Image: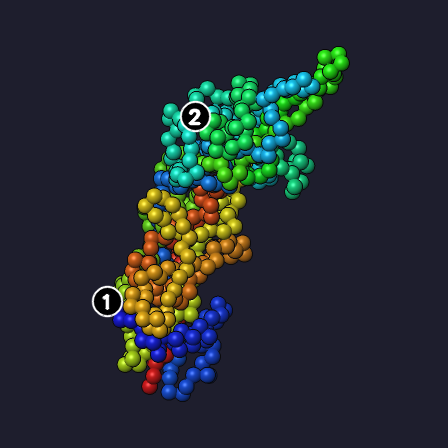
């Protein structure tokens, strides 16, 4: 078992190391050498290590409570085929009078019921001109906000197989370029639903129309899926903003104002009632992947690494697998650091401190951008996540309790709730890479607790509603450049007393 770091050495060591070598530009780690006592020899190292990683298929993700819904089918030449559909409830808004009654001066009647799905420019992946047949079905089985739903949700028997609305659309929808060049333009797919459903809603009682739970129980939900119509295209996925004001269910209705003298229609008024889709609604994304053997899974020597959303390919990272060669012998990096940390003891003449630990992933921009008619922007940020048994991704929340604090509060098992953290993750367009940093404390957590070394999963933020993918370089035994793959860069200092 690793020795606990002694109180009087831990704080001075790490304060000194951080103060002396925090700059990323200081390659040798010698900044501040002149302030050290004359009886100590200070040295710094800046070392890089290849991280063995692999493409991994999570098969499913928790995909409920999404802000964006995905619809469509795309045949990605670098990652295979993906089909996306979604389920959503709708809600009642602010009721302005009864819709199901008439009196001596008003006669109400329904006109139509329209599902509006909104998105803005560049909210698509693949061929923007690819046409889809969009169909809407009614889900009759209840959905519960308190339950968890997953991307492989089986809807068999949960919805009426007869569609209640259809539309043919592409992401671009054959609009003039000038329309899409307006940054404020919001596009809507307007899908007219069946007259039978419109009449049913129009005649809901006041009790139903004034209770959100009663309304959702009676209405059920909507299932929206698509079929690619064009054969000579990659297809596309479109990302709908489900919480936008422009995404809703709109009931259009009219009423006659009756002239009480003649008992004839005097005026006909047209109005509408908006049923919003909001945070109170269950919203579930569903995905189906056929990678067609293109993505090389579970192979650390894969030629390229694919990071997808939608329960596609993630990059699996286990820091336990990092190795280095010292004097002709290959050793695990963290085995080496266990020895180094154990040397930070009262009687040792050599003390080690971590100043910075950086992680780099390089994008293969040539492959990413090679398809002229395939819109696939590089994601502006990725995240390092842990995944639980149910398939839920979570970004680990940094938590660290020092031995000093533990000693001061008589806490024996002070390492129990340690949790690592990773800063950064943004894409640097100048260097073509994603960069993460872990603190010295996080690195030492991993040294002292092997279970904190992984696995972690490199994935997009909001992976359950993110259609785009990125292609990363991987170092393989046949690579000419050993630094093209995922890299761990460790900067540390050590002090040796004479």
Residue 210 is left or right of residue 420, and the answer is right
Residue 316 is left or right of residue 267, and the answer is left
Q: In which quadrant is the C terminus drawn?
A: bottom left
What colouring style does the render use?
rainbow
Q: Earlier in the sequence, mark 2 or mark 1?
A: 1
- Visible in this render: residue 378? yes
Q: Dot 1 corresponds to which residue? A: 1
Q: Is residue 326 placed above or below 473 in the rendered structure?
A: below
| Residue 391, picture quadrant | top left
Q: Residues within 10 Å of mark 1 (few under 14, many from 20)?
A: few
The residue at 39%/75% (across/down) is: 11
Residue 89: x and y in percent read 49, 32
Spatial CA distance of label 2 from label 1 is 57 Å
The residue at 73%/19% (across/down) is: 267
Which one is nearer the viewer's eye here, 139 or 83? 139
Q: Dot 2 corresponds to which residue? A: 140
The residue at 59%/34% (across/down) is: 94
- Visible in this render: residue 81? no
Q: Indicate which label's residue lies in the foreground, 2 or 1.
A: 2
Q: Is residue 90 placed above or below 65 in the rendered structure?
A: above
Residue 356: x and y in percent read 43, 67
Residue 115: x and y in percent read 56, 28
Say what secondary structure mark 2 lies in: loop
């Amino acid at each position: 078992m690793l020795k606990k770091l002694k109180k009087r050495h831990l704080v001075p060591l790490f304060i000194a190391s951080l103060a002396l070598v925090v700059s990323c530009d200081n390659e040798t780690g010698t900044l501040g050498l002149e302030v050290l006592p004359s009886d100590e020899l200070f040295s710094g190292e800046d070392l890089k290590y290849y991280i063995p990683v692999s493409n991994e298929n999570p098969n499913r993700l928790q995909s409920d409570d999404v802000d964006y819904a995905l619809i469509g089918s795309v045949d990605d030449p670098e990652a295979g085929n993906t089909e996306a559909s979604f389920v959503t409830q709708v809600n009642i808004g602010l009721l302005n009078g009864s819709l199901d009654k008439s009196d001596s001066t008003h006669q109400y009647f329904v006109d139509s019921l329209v599902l509006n799905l909104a998105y803005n420019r560049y909210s698509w992946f693949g061929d923007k001109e690819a046409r889809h047949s969009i169909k809407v079905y009614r889900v009759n089985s209840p959905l519960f906000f308190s339950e968890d739903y997953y991307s492989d949700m089986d809807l068999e028997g949960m919805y009426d197989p007869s569609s209640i609305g259809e539309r043919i659309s592409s992401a671009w929808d054959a609009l003039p370029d000038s329309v899409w060049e307006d940054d404020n333009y919001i596009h809507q797919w307007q899908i007219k639903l069946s007259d039978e459903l419109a009449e049913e809603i129009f005649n809901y009682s006041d009790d139903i129309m004034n209770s959100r739970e009663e309304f959702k129980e009676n209405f059920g939900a909507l299932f929206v899926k698509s079929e690619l119509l064009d054969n000579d295209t990659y297809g596309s996925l479109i990302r709908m903003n489900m919480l936008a004001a422009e995404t809703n269910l709109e009931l259009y209705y009219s009423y006659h104002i009756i002239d009480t003298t003649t008992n004839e229609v005097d005026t006909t008024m047209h109005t509408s009632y908006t049923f919003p889709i909001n945070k109170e609604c269950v919203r579930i994304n569903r995905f189906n992947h056929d990678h067609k053997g293109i993505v090389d899974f579970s192979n650390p020597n894969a030629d390229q690494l694919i990071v997808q959303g939608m329960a596609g390919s993630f990059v699996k990272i286990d820091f336990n697998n990092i190795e280095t060669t010292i004097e002709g012998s290959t050793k695990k990096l963290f085995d080496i650091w266990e020895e180094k940390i154990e040397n930070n003891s009262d009687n040792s003449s050599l003390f080690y401190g971590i100043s910075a630990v950086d992680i780099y992933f390089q994008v293969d921009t040539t492959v990413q951008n090679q398809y002229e008619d395939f819109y696939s922007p590089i994601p502006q940020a990725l995240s390092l996540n842990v995944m639980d048994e149910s398939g839920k991704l979570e970004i680990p929340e940094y938590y660290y309790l020092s031995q000093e604090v533990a000693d001061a509060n008589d806490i024996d098992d002070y390492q129990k709730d340690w949790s690592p953290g990773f800063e950064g993750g943004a894409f640097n367009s100048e260097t073509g890479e994603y960069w993460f940093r872990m603190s010295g404390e996080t690195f030492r957590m991993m040294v002292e607790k092997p279970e904190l070394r992984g696995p972690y999963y490199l994935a997009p933020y909001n992976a359950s509603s993110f259609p785009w993918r990125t292609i990363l370089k991987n170092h393989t035994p046949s690579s000419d450049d050993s630094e093209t793959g995922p890299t761990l860069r460790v900067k540390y200092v050590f002090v040796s007393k004479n």
